[in-house]
Image (tube, rainbow, N blue to C red):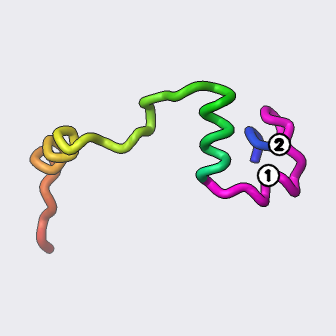
Amino acid sequence: METGLGVLGLAPAVFWSLTPRELQAILRGKFGVSSEGAAPTRVQLDALMRQYPDREA
């Protein structure tokens, strides 16, 4: 909300009517694309799964 209303200056009705995908597009258009927070690649996920295997209780 802070980003949508404060930084982007969207009206509350506009902010609340946005879909998550629309908000993401606005943020990418305003601030560019960042790999931070992106979904892990298959290789990264496999490495995490080896490092932190599921344990059965």
Task: Please tell me how crowded label 1 is: few (under 14), some (14-19), or many (20+) other residues with Cα within 10 Å.
Answer: some
**Residue designated by label 1:** 15
Compare residues 44 and 56 and report the one nearer the observer.
44
Q: Residue at x 44, y 31 (%)?
A: 36
Residue 18 painted magenta: yes
Camera-side residue of 56 and 24: 24
Q: Position of residue 5 (x, y in %)?
A: 83, 43
Mark 1: secondary structure:
helix
Type of the residue with mark 1:
Phe
* Total labels drawn: 2
Residue at 26 percent across and 40 percent down: it is: 41
As drawn, the label of residue 39 is none
Which sits in the foreground, 13 or 44? 13
For label 2, the residue is 5
Question: Which residue type does callout 2 highlight?
Answer: Leu
Magenta segment's dominant SS is helix
Q: Over which residues does the magenta segment extend? A: 5-20
Residue 43 drawn at (x, y percent): 17, 39
Query: Are the residues tagged 1 and 2 within 8 Å (C-beta)?
Result: yes
Q: Position of residue 48 (x, y in %)?
A: 19, 44
Residue 4 drawn in magenta? no
Above or below 10: residue 14 = below
Outermost residue to the top = 32
Query: In the depicted view, which residue is nearer to us: 37 or 41?
Result: 41
As drawn, is 49 to the left or to the right of 26? left
Residue 1: % across, % down? 75, 48
User: What residue sits 14% from the left and 74% below the top?
Assistant: 57
Instruction: Relative to 28, say whether 16 is above or below.
Output: below
